[in-house]
Image (tube, grey):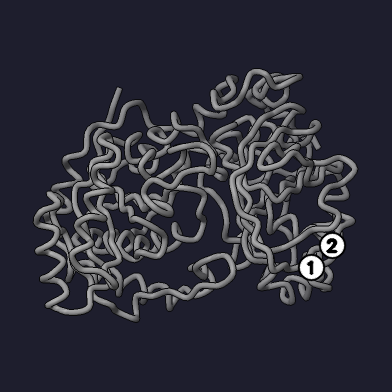
């Protein structure tokens, strides 16, 4: 089975070339024409999809061949693109930059090949003229399986500069599909982990996205870009489905069968949960699982909530900056990533909620925390009191910790049985001391062997961001524990 959705992958020779501006602008420009646009982002980035969502009115979704495995890229794409007229996929880093030491794995080029999608190369032309032809020729010819279907020249200085660039590219055999000049209002502010998320500057972000759309519409040949998108071949396979995923007892093939002990999918982690009854339930009849949201906790993959719902949970989002109580009937808590360090004072000042979170965790209820969630559960963050669930202290650091991780569950927890292999991603400028509890969450194999995170009673807290679509047993097990705890 295969499906065809017109699509483009927006790539660049390197970071900082203007991929986000062009990709978001294309999404907004196509949407302004009345098209249903499906937004996607290569890699583990949580922030760009927020801007994509503003541009399209649809949830921004990630396509990560490292976290989820190459075989899930197509199905997850088709899941997100259901009912859409066109899809725009923003790349990551340079076109051929993948996971360190893993060749092309998880690169934009790799994802483009998996999707059978043409690539539009965004080139920062601000400091070159004729050399642009050599650059484009090199990227277009490096891998014959990658089809570079056109170029968008960004940061062009003048009409004369544009003329020189077009003359040079005439010999490269790659058409120029757009020329963008330097425009200040389309720039978005950044800080220590990249762009400032939409949730923290919504009004300004709406204006920025509108400006991106106007600039792209004015400087790009949208008809030619749409025609290029329609030239994409069919994506093999069927769309990913959360209900089918949680019903399947098999573990994902990206896992290694040499893992000792029980395999993911065996026992409690693999069986589809039955309603065990007991305790308050949400309006949907299943246990109420609350998910932290708002400006402080913006990092979350859409598939996580979909998997929790498919496993029978009643999923409710709350804002730890504003809500002083957990939603009524809370049986489990998921706290993803974000920027608690930016909002440490406000989070600390919300003492009623901190106490409610601590009481929930101390009762043995399931709590899953990643990165920002880990910091929130600590005793303190930069000297300010947090929830105190973990006997650990967190602080900001000058050092950026960044990269993919190959991990194995050290022991049984509310998320996984011992020996479960998952791939994750770390991205933070904070330090937690100690870095692991008496029962660590993960044994991390890359880039150096170590243990990290905390498992205590129903709490699983770690720096690792994971994508649950790669191992639906995580959602099944968590919801089952919410039923029975």
User: Is 255 placed above or below 57 here?
Assistant: above
Residue 364 in picture, x, y percent from top left: 85, 43
Residue 37 in picture, x, y percent from top left: 29, 52
Task: Decide which of 124, 228 is in the foreground and name it.
Answer: 124
Residue 232 in picture, x, y percent from top left: 21, 38
- SS label for mark 2: strand
Task: Decide which of 235, 472 is in the foreground and name it.
Answer: 235
Relative side of 76 to 295, left or right: left
Relative side of 292 to 104, left or right: right
Image quarter in which the N terminus is found:
top left
Q: How many marks?
A: 2
Q: Residue at x 64, y 66 (%)?
A: 339
Residue 69 in picture, x, y percent from top left: 50, 32
Relative side of 103 to 365, left or right: left
Pointer 2 residue = 393
Crowd tier of the residue under label 1, counting other residues whose Cα lies within 10 Å: few below 14, some 14–19, many 20 or above = many
The answer to whether residue 96 of the structure is visible from this angle is yes
* CB contact under 8 Å: marks 2 and 1: yes
- SS label for mark 1: strand
Crowd tier of the residue under label 2, counting other residues whose Cα lies within 10 Å: few below 14, some 14–19, many 20 or above = many
The answer to whether residue 59 of the structure is visible from this angle is no
Q: Residue at x 23, y 73 (%)?
A: 156
Q: Separation of disc 2 and disc 1 at Cα? A: 6 Å
Q: Residue at x 81, y 68 (%)?
A: 352
Relative side of 415 to 29, left or right: right
Pointer 1 residue = 381
Q: Mark 2 vs mark 1: which is more N-terminal? A: 1
């Amino acid at each position: 089975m295969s499906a065809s959705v017109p699509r483009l992958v927006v790539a660049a020779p390197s970071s900082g070339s203007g991929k986000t501006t062009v990709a978001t602008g294309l999404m907004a420009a196509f949407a302004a024409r009345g098209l249903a646009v499906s937004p996607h982002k290569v890699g583990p980035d949580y922030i760009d999809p927020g801007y994509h969502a503003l541009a399209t009115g649809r949830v921004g979704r990630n396509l990560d061949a490292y976290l989820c495995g190459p075989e899930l890229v197509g199905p997850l794409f088709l899941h997100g693109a259901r009912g859409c007229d066109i899809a725009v996929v923003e790349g990551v880093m340079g076109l051929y930059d993948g996971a360190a030491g893993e060749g092309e794995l998880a690169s934009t080029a790799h994802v483009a090949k998996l999707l059978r999608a043409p690539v539009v190369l965004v080139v920062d032309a601000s400091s070159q003229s004729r050399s642009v032809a050599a650059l484009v020729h090199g990227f277009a010819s490096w891998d014959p399986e990658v089809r570079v279907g056109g170029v968008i020249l960004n940061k062009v200085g003048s009409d004369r500069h544009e003329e020189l660039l077009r003359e040079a590219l005439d010999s490269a055999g790659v058409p120029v599909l757009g020329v963008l000049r330097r425009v200040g209002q389309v720039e978005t502010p950044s800080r220590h982990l990249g762009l400032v998320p939409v949730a923290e500057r919504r009004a300004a972000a709406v204006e920025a996205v509108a400006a991106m759309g106007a600039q792209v519409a004015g400087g790009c040949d949208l008809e030619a870009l749409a025609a290029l998108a329609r030239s994409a071949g069919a994506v093999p396979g069927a769309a990913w489905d959360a209900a089918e995923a949680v019903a399947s007892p098999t573990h994902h093939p990206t896992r290694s069968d040499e893992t000792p002990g029980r395999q993911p999918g065996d026992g409690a982690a693999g069986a589809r949960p039955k309603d065990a009854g007991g305790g308050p339930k949400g309006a949907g009849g299943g246990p109420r699982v609350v998910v932290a949201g708002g400006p402080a906790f913006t990092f979350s993959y859409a598939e996580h909530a979909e998997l929790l719902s498919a496993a029978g949970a009643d999923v409710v989002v709350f804002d730890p900056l504003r809500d002083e109580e957990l939603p009524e009937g809370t049986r489990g808590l998921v706290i993803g990533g974000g920027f608690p360090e930016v909002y440490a004072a406000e989070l600390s000042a919300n003492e009623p909620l901190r106490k409610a979170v601590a009481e929930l965790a101390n009762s043995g209820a399931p709590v899953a925390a990643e990165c920002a969630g880990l910091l929130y559960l600590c005793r303190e963050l930069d000297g300010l009191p947090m929830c105190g669930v973990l006997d650990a202290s967190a602080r900001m650091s000058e050092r950026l910790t960044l990269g993919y991780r190959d991990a194995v569950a050290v022991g049984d927890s509310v998320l996984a049985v011992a020996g479960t292999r998952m791939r994750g991603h770390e991205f933070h400028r904070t330090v937690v001391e100690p870095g692991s509890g008496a029962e660590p969450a993960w044994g991390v194999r890359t880039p150096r062997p170590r243990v990290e995170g905390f498992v205590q009673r129903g709490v699983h807290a770690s720096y690792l961001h994971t994508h649950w679509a790669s191992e639906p047993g995580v959602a099944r097990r968590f919801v089952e524990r919410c039923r029975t705890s």
